[in-house]
Structure formats: C-alpha cells, structure tokens
Image (cartoon, helix red, strand yellow):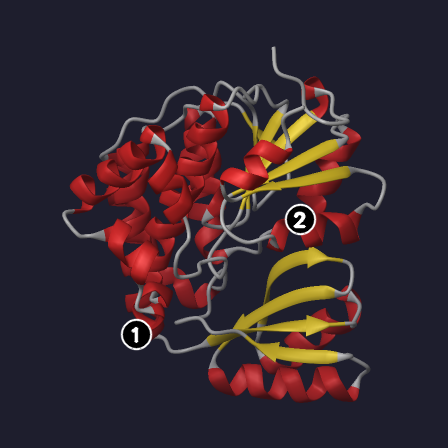
Amino acid sequence: MVELKKTSISKTAFVFPGQGSQTVGMGYTLYQSSRQAREVFEEADSALQIPLSRLCFEGPEEELRETINAQPAILTTSVACLRVAADFGIPLEPALVAGHSLGEYTALVASNTIEFTDAVRLVRERGRLMQEAGKTKPGGMAAIIGLDEISLEAVCLETGAEIANFNCSGQIVISGTREALARSMDLAKARGAKRVVPLQVSGAFHSTLMQPTIEGMSLAISRIDLHLPEIPIVANSTAQPMTSADEVKEELIQQLCHCVQWQPSVEYMVEAGVSTFIEIGPGQVLTGLIRRINDKVQVHNINDIESIKSLIL
C-alpha cells in the first residue's frame, strides 16, 4: 500500500469544497494527463448535455461563476481529483468525509451513497433552483471577519439577516435581503468587526430566502437512488455523522435553508480521532479554514497532478 507523508489513513478525513472555489482552468491538467479524469468530465458532459468540461477549462469566468454552472463544475472537478488520486495509489479509506455546502454532494459520491452522474444532475438542478430563488427573493451574503458569534447573532436579530456559515473562529458568513445585509454590515463594523466582505453570489444561500428551492429539490432527490453510506458523512446542518439514506435525504433538504456548521463539523471530526484532513477539489479554502480551527492537525490539498504526486512517498 502506498503511504502518505506523515499521515495515518485510519485517522484521515476527506473534505470537499463548495461554491466560490471555481476558477477557469480547473481540472485541465488532470484531464490532459489522466484517463480517469477524462472519463469524469466526459460523464458530466453527457449527463448534463452541455459542454461543462470546456466551461471549466476555458470559461468565460462570468458564465462559470453562475450558480447553475459553478455547482456541477466544482463537483465534477473534485470527483476527477478523487479518482486520479485513487489511480495514483493514494488509499481512499478515510474515517470520515464532509463537504462545505455543495461539497457535501461530492462527499456523497466519495462514500458511494450516490452515483456521480446522479449527483452532477442533482447539483445542476440545485444550482438552477437556487439561482431562481435568488431572483424571486433577491438577497446576498457577506463574510464578517473578527466579530464573535454572540455579537453577530445580536446584529442579525436587529436586521433580519441570518447566519449562513460558521466557517471558523472570527469568520462567519451571513445571508439576507440586500437591505438586511447593508444594515448588518454597517452594524458589524460599528461593533468591532475587522472587515466585512460582500460575496459574489446570486442569492441569500443557507437562509429562509431559499425556501422556494425546497419543493423542486425534494422532487429531484426522490427520483434518484441513495445507498447506505460506506463512509460516515458529517452533515452540514448538524455537524454529526450520517449513516443512512434517510438521514442523507433529510440533510440535503435541511442544508438549503439552514446554516453550514463547518467549524463544529471539523471539531467533531478531530474529537472522533481525525488528525489529518485532505481537501480534494479546486482551491484551498477549506485547507485555510481547518488550519485556523485547529493548528495541531495536518492538512493537505489535492487539486492537480502535482499536488497528488506530492502526497506520495
């Protein structure tokens, strides 16, 4: 068995990035050098009946950033990374898997809970519904840096905004209407936030403004087969492991309108014995967050051929 640098595979968790990690060119070196990666991108193109791979490799960036495109593009690139890693001999036997928002669907693929082609069609529909909800109930998101949870919860109570992501200590994302966000950002700065950063998204994700997505996603999920997870998946909305198909179905609906509990999820995995995290997919957002949550764990990132090779002794 191939060994990983300074890791114990029984104490490893795989984590998968969410929307915002997309970049033009992602997955291209994998596609060029790996048959497994080419098959993944070809499967996605065929399943969606659109040239998703070309959009990943060539853009344009504005089109790739659209929620309806970004979500299947990130999922596809992440699965390509996962399959190429397996082909290079990296053992795919993590103790736990988890994904940030959209990344939870990649975790489902990694745990063999859902087939890849079903997942890519499902997240394309998820992206479409979320994009449409953003038009029906306009809103947005903002990252609040350097303000504690209690203070930010008080701000949200005053403005009507909602906490959408507990990413790590000192970095919390809020969602809401444009008016609520503007008031929240002003109040947060007045109460000591170091920075407030509006996010480039098409709606108020992980808030009650996403309610219009529930019916459509429930129908889409009912049409696919979900299997018993082969690896426990730590759920976004509860920060607890899912071990049944019914739990997965409930979670996929819950996470649309509820907060992503990323910091509690990482803390749960560490308490469960995980000492090494491997982020698999474009970007290094989760790598940075995990290091801020716990500076004692080891964190690696896989997003291209070179990063995969660097993990192999």
Nearest the viewer among 79 and 54 is 54
Q: Residue furthest right?
A: 296
Q: Position of residue 267 (x, y in %)?
A: 75, 41
Residue 185, quarter of picture? bottom right
Provide the secondary structure element on which disc 1 rests: helix
* Residue located at (67% from left, 18% from top): 3
Q: Position of residue 113 (x, y in %)?
A: 40, 26
Q: Confirm whether residue 170 shows in the render.
A: yes
Nearest the viewer among 241 and 61 is 61
Classify 10 Å Cα crowding around label 2: few (below 14), some (14-19), many (20 and above).
Answer: many
Q: Is residue 143 left or right of residue 148?
A: left
Quarter of the N terminus within the rendering: top right
Q: Which mark is residue 191?
A: none
Total label count?
2
Classify 10 Å Cα crowding around label 1: few (below 14), some (14-19), many (20 and above).
Answer: few
Vertically, is 249 above or below 23? above
Q: Is residue 222 left or right of residue 50?
A: right
Q: Position of residue 176 (x, y in %)?
A: 51, 75
Q: Which mark is residue 287?
A: 2
The kind of residue on which mark 1 rests is Thr
Q: Position of residue 63 (x, y in %)?
A: 30, 68
Nearest the viewer among 64 and 245 is 64
Q: CA distance from mark 1 to mark 2?
A: 34 Å
Quarter of the C terminus within the rendering: top right
Vertically, is 168 above or below 271? below
Q: Which mark is residue 136?
A: 1
Are the residues tagged 1 and 2 within 8 Å (C-beta)?
no
Residue 239, quarter of picture? top right
The kind of residue on which mark 2 rests is Thr
Q: Is residue 288 left or right of residue 127?
A: right
Provide the secondary structure element on which disc 2 rests: helix
Marks 1 and 2: which is nearer the front?
2
